[in-house]
Structure formats: C-alpha cells, structure tokens
Image (spheres, rainbow, N blue to C red):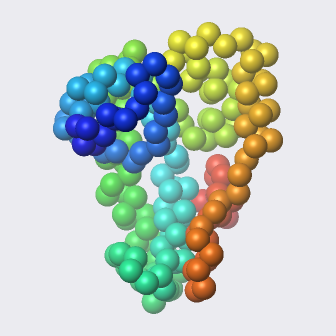
Amino acid sequence: IPENGFKYFPEKCYSCIKTHASPTTENFKSLDKNGIEKIIVIYRDPRDVAISKYFHWSNVSNRPGKLKFVDYNSMNKNEAIKHSIMVVKRYVFEWINGWLVYSKLNPNKVSIVRYEDMYANSFAIFKKMSQHYCLNLNDEQITLLLDLLKKNKKGFQINNVAGQKSTFRKGGSGDWKN
C-alpha cells in the first residue's frame, strides 16, 4: 500500500476500499501513517479460492496482453485444479494467517470475517461490521440496508470486446464441492 494511497479520501466521511493487500510490516505502517483506524478483513474458504482460480485462469488464456502464469487449457482438469490448490496453499494461507496475527495484535482495529459466515448469516455479520465501525445501527436499520443491497445488486460487467468472455461465476460458499 503506497504511503499516499489514501490522500484523496475525504476526512469527514466514511470511505471503503477493497484490496488484496498483503499483511506486511510495510503495509501496516502505511495504514497507521494514513490514520486508518478500522479494517475489516474478509477471507474465503481456500478450497473455494482454488476452484475460483482454476475457472478464472481457464478463461483468461486467450486474452491478449494478459499476464498468464500457467495455461490451464493445455492441462487436463485434474492437473490444473491440483496446480491451483498448490498456488492457494503457497499464498492464501500465508495471507489469511498474516491478517489473523495482525488482528490479534490489534483487536480494536481489525475485524475478521469469513465469507462463508457472511453468506450464511448476512444479518449477524453486517451487525458485527457496523459495531466494529461504531455505527450503532439498530436491527431495523440493518434489515433495511441489507434489503436495499439485495435489490440494488449490479451484474458483473466487463468490456464487450470480441473474443473475451467474463470469468465471473456465481461462486458462493462451498462451491469447491461441485
């Protein structure tokens, strides 16, 4: 995270960013230097991450100009999934564990949320998130916000360029079983 990564954030408003930032000392220092006081880390079941990566990398091989580590289309499905599992094993567990350690050292700053918990019980997790940010929302307000979010879901958009197809899949919790 660059030290000036938050310079355009308004000072008197809530702001939210989504990032895959690594839990490194440099990133923690940058967050502190920029006055980031509250963080929510959401992570997925690594098995679902492995399957998602498999489908993503299977669908991006023919995109011009895209960096490609392994051509999954040149492998059989089992080999490609095994490779994806090894990538997840090497990087995702380290990422999750790094944020878990940081959250234990900074319990008032960092809240950890499992995607599967959020998927299974949106109300309880949204309430936990709102409490983390000291928003003091009551149950009725949380229900209203969740209903609004469900109604305003936007579909996944990509540039409509010939030869490209979306790598978006429904996904969800436990998709690795399929």
Q: Residue furthest bottom?
A: 74
Q: Residue at x 55, y 56 (%)?
A: 48
- Left or right, 77 with reference to 6: right
**Quarter that holds the C terminus:** bottom right
On-image quarter of the N terminus: top left
- Residue drawn at 54 percent across, 77 percent down: 59
Can residue 13 be seen in the rendering of this structure?
yes
Q: Residue at x 23, y 26 (%)?
A: 33
Question: Is residue 178 shown above or below 97?
Answer: below
Is residue 58 placed above or below 155 in the rendered structure? below
> Looking at this view, is 158 or 51 the one in front?
158
Q: Where is residue 128 in the image (x, y as percent from the top left)?
A: 59, 20
What is the quadrant of residue 122 in the picture?
A: top right
Q: Using residue 36 as the reference point, say whether residue 118 is left or right of it.
A: right
Please tell me whether residue 61 is drawn above or below residue 137 in the rendered image. below
Q: Is residue 78 visible?
A: no
Q: In this view, does 25 lie to the left or right of 73?
A: left
Q: Relative to residue 128, is residue 144 drawn left or right?
A: right
Q: Which residue is drawn at 23% across and 37% down?
A: 3
Q: Is residue 175 above or below residue 31?
A: below
**Viewer-proximal residue among 128 and 144:** 144
Q: Where is residue 177 in the image (x, y as percent from the top left)?
A: 64, 60
Q: Residue 87 at x, y = what percent?
A: 36, 63
Residue placed most toward the observer, 101 or 24: 24
Q: How many labels does the image show?
A: 0
